[in-house]
């Protein structure tokens, strides 16, 4: 900052400034520097302000970290539930194999029957050349 060496301390107009406040960037002289953790400020107020900001940033980061952790933990729990559900379903299937197979077959037959009926209804109800009919048939097949 070239202009820094041309400016004077805001509190001492006869003294050249040596640095700027890290918070409000006011030019300040050696006597006015309030140093915190190696950073220069023009006043205690600015130093405390900066500290508070740093604290807030840290808190925000900490909160984000915690939220990430929570999200990850929730994902793991969901995964576990899915695995457990799959295991339970597999176990249930093995225990009731014949029942489930019969049910599946029955469902499949019913579905086939429904499709057949739907097809017949379409064939009966709509003229042969209809675009609508072609579309519906394409859906069924
Ligand atoms: Zn300041
Ligand atoms: Zn000064």
Image: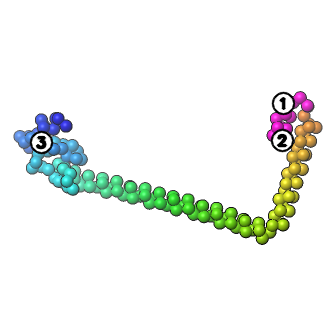
Disc on the earlier residue, 3 or 1: 3
- Label 3, label 2: how far apart the Cα atoms are: 85 Å
Write down the region rendered in magenta. 127-141
Residue 97: image quadrant is: bottom right
Circle 1 Cα neighbour tier, 10 Å, few/some/many (<14 / 14–19 / ≥20): few
**Residue 45 in view of the camera:** no
Q: Is residue 27 left or right of residue 49?
A: left
Disc on the earlier residue, 3 or 2: 3
Q: Residue at x 83, y 59 (%)?
A: 104
Q: Residue at x 17, y 53 (%)?
A: 35
- Vertical arrangement, residue 106 with respect to residue 119, above or below: below
Query: Ligand 2 closer than 8 Å to the CB at disc 3?
Result: yes
- Label 3, label 1: how far apart the Cα atoms are: 86 Å
The image's colour scheme reads rainbow
Mark closer to the observer (1, 2): 2
Q: Quadrant of the N terminus?
A: top left
Residue, far bottom? 95
Residue indicated by mark 3: 17
């Amino acid at each position: 900052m070239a202009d820094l060496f041309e400016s004077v301390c805001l509190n001492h107009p006869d003294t050249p400034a040596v640095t700027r406040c890290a918070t409000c960037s006011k030019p300040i002289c050696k006597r006015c520097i309030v140093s915190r953790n190696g950073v220069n400020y023009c006043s205690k107020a600015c130093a405390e302000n900066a500290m508070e900001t740093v604290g807030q940033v840290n808190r925000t980061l900490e909160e984000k970290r915690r939220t990430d952790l929570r999200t990850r933990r929730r994902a793991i729990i969901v995964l576990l539930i899915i695995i457990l559900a799959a295991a339970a379903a597999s176990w249930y299937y093995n225990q009731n194999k014949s029942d489930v197979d019969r049910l599946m077959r029955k469902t499949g037959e019913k579905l086939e029957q429904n499709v057949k009926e739907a097809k017949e209804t379409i064939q009966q109800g709509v003229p042969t050349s209809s675009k609508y009919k072609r579309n519906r048939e394409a859906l069924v097949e």
